[in-house]
Image (cartoon, grey):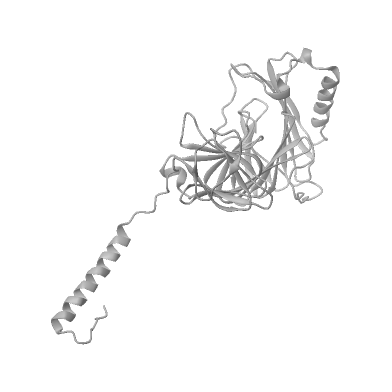
Amino acid sequence: MAQCRVRGATGEEEFLMNMRMSFMIAVCVTVCCVVPATKAAPFEPLFRITSISGECSVKTPDSEQFKNAEDGRAYPYGTMVKTGRKSSAVIVFSEGNTCRLLADAMVTIAEGVKDPKLKTIKLATGRVEVELEPEHHKTNGDSLNVETATAICGAIGCKFTVVFTVEGELQITTVSVEDGQVKITGLQAGLFEGILDSPDTMSIAMGSDKFIRLRLSKGATGLIVQDSEGNPRTIDLKAGSSIKIWRRLSENGKDWVTVIMILGTDDQPIETYTVVQPLGEGEQPTGEQTQKPGEQQKGAEEQEEMDLRQFATTTTTTTTTTTTIPPGTQPTIRPPVTPTTTIPSGGGGHHPPSPTPVGRR
């Protein structure tokens, strides 16, 4: 170790000074060696809004109207936040755990009633960019979802973007993973589930409460759906391939009729099958599905039948299967340890996705 000499100091003074320096260096090295890995900061009781650019307003649970947001102020969960044109703001859950709202976005920042550690960003419109510490879901028990009208995106220590738009009758959620993983699930139990890794990008489009299209525009992933027997089945998707799910209430009003179509990268059907399941105990259809068949107008019935025939139209390469699942056998989606189907490349080669990866109905 280099010795320190001070002008005018005696030999004893130099010795003491060198001893002090040695002690300081030793302490510094010891501390650096024993400090454990940084623990992810737990979510705070209130969230803060920072870095406001342009227009940003909030409506707290006890308020009836929106007011201008204050930069740096903390707000209670249950607050609605919206940004204006060419505006942005950052939601801070805790240090290192943030959500950036871009222009013309509207969200509700909520927390679970039964589990307050679960925070949910309910995205009504616009684009959000979420960034979480890599270990946040392991160290504190906190969890964060981004929920839209078509899917739930569960963050697993990562950085990702969710965009929600409406195009005609289609409600479209697009999820892009930059780092880490995001778990996606359908709002209706058992319809679909999967894990997206970087650089996966997937769109989930839904129309009139009964049609869903999942299209992978970038990356490769496995998506879990039900097979013809109602058991979990993993479909390996490549960029450009997709899955269509069409679900309706049966004529007797007691069963779900689900048609699943797998399409290749050329957007041509590879396989189609149908699953019939009884409604679960206490389960109630929503939206258009709440109408009883006898109450539907004839025109609506004819349109529904035409939609189903059009949706289930297949080519000679398509296999169609119909299976009725007995009551009480509703499957629980579990990790992909199930049979896997790999989507082959289409005969016409790879078709690059459109800028908004929605796909055709």
- Quarter of image, res 236: top right
The residue sitting at 46% across, 37% down in the picture is 117
Residue 103, placed above or below residue 149: below
Looking at the image, how many numbered discs can be counted on the residues? Answer: 0
The residue sitting at 80% across, 47% down in the picture is 347
Q: Quadrant of the C terminus?
A: top right
| Residue lying furthest left | 12
Query: Could you say where residue 119 lies in the image, as x and y percent from the top left?
Result: 51, 38
Q: In which quarter of the image is the N terminus?
A: bottom left
Viewer-side residue, 107 vs 116: 107
Residue 142, placed above or below residue 8: above
Side (left or right) of 88 relative to 21 = right
Viewer-side residue, 274 vs 136: 136
Query: Could you say where residue 143 lies in the image, as x and y percent from the top left?
Result: 49, 40
Query: Could you say where residue 269 lies in the image, as x and y percent from the top left?
Result: 78, 37
Residue 254, placed above or below residue 160: above
Viewer-side residue, 71 vs 323: 71
